[in-house]
Amino acid sequence: MTHRERFRRLMHYQSVDRGIHWDFGFLTEAMDRWVTEGLPEEVGSGDKRGDRMSRISAYFGKDPTMGVPVHLHLHPGFPYEVIEVRERTIVHRDGDGNIVEEIKEGERTIPHVIENGLKGRADWERYKAMLDPDEPARHQWDYKAMAERYNRADVPVVIGIGSFVGWIRNWVGAAELGYMCYDDPELVSEMVNHLCDLFCAVLEPALKEIEVDLAWGWEDICFNNGPLVGPNIWRQLVSEPMTRVCKLLRRHGVDVILTDCDGNVQALAPVWLECGLNGMFPCEVAGGSDPVLLRSRLGKDALLFGGVNKRALTDKAAILAELKRLSPLVEEGGYIPFVDHRVPGYVSYENYRYYEREKLAMLGFGKAEVEAIEPLRGMDRTTLKSVY
């Protein structure tokens, strides 16, 4: 099968020759550690984390995709502005308009927000001006000219679909989002609907010309105890706009529609399914979104991505147990297993190689396919099938 055929069949619970080999990337501490433990320096080193992750993914033979270019976010965004340089940190204004504090050296994950940029309706007008659907930068691509290359591709074609609440959370702050849903629901509704209008205006020209296999959104609005915005508020303020975008996608043949949301999505996942969004990513186990649990509660309506507990990668016996636990989902279909967030620095290079080797055995990769992946070549094979 081609990569594209395999993806389409797997997402519709049809038989495939093997599973799909993806990952979610790696934290800087892991990449730095692995270079000292055997990962070639030309693969794992460098100044740009994104480039390093891409090289490591390619080195481990990850299955490819193609992305359709779209511009859905703030334009031009807020200019970077250094406000204060401290001993260990820099205080600056970021592209979302927030004043944040970020460490100078070491792993940069989520910066500390000192002050959010969007505090009410007056600020929203500034943001709204940067979310103009008619902005020429959003319509710079000739999708008709690009269509043949994408439509003939033998890899899955992916398109971004933005965020309905997660971006707003970034702009106003987590606590203020909760208050705003009750104190000024009209403003929240206006923001969500404006984003929806923008997404539809930008996505439709691409969807008319290009066959898309996977629509990919982002929210990150859940903690381990549940969401910042509960299902009742979601239905009141967000469901209708989300449904409009999902209907647009489905009219153009896109029926794999996921959102990236860490934490516990159990309360919101049924609402998303009502709206037409059916993909759950990254199924963060410790955060409350174990894929085994989600499949038991949501059935085959939910397509699952991720869900390998990162905390199990510290021990080879635990790795085998975790993969064995997930193997029924792999057999059932509608599921692509990979680590449930960036691989952290406490995971050794040896254990990551072992995990990758055993995951490929679970996915049905043949010996020759595995031997073609340089870091896995010549490894001893436990073979999960012998464990079952």
Image (cartoon, rainbow, N blue to C red):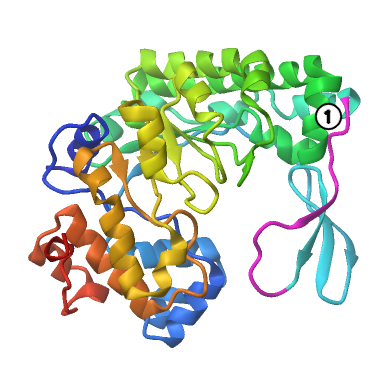
Residue located at (65% from left, 19% from top)? 232
Residue 373 is drawn in which quadrant? bottom left
Residue 222 is drawn in which quadrant? top right
Q: Is residue 333 above or below residue 43?
A: above
Q: Residue 335, how many percent across, how many down?
A: 30, 41
Residue located at (23% from left, 46% from top)? 328
| Residue 57 seen in render | yes
Q: Residue 253, how many percent across, how many down?
A: 32, 19
Q: Residue 76, how many percent across, how many down?
A: 71, 38
Amino acid at dot 1: Tyr
Residue located at (40% from left, 26% from top)? 143
Q: Is residue 145 above or below residue 250?
A: below
Residue 180 is drawn in which quadrant? top right
Residue with the mark numbered 1? 179
Q: Left or right of 149: which side holds 197?
A: right
Q: Nearer the viewer, residue 20 or 71?
A: 20
The verdict on residue 332 being magenta is no
Q: Residues within 10 Å of mark 1 (few under 14, many from 20)?
A: few
Number of marks in the image? 1
Q: Quadrant of the C terminus?
A: bottom left
- Mark 1 lies on a secondary structure that is helix
Q: Main secondary structure of the magenta part?
A: loop
Q: Residue 15, how many percent across, how many down?
A: 12, 36
Q: Is residue 109 above or below residue 354?
A: above
Residue located at (78% from left, 31% from top)? 178
The verdict on residue 112 being magenta is yes
Q: Quadrant of the N terminus?
A: top left
Q: Give the magenta range.
A: 105-120
| Residue 74 seen in render | no
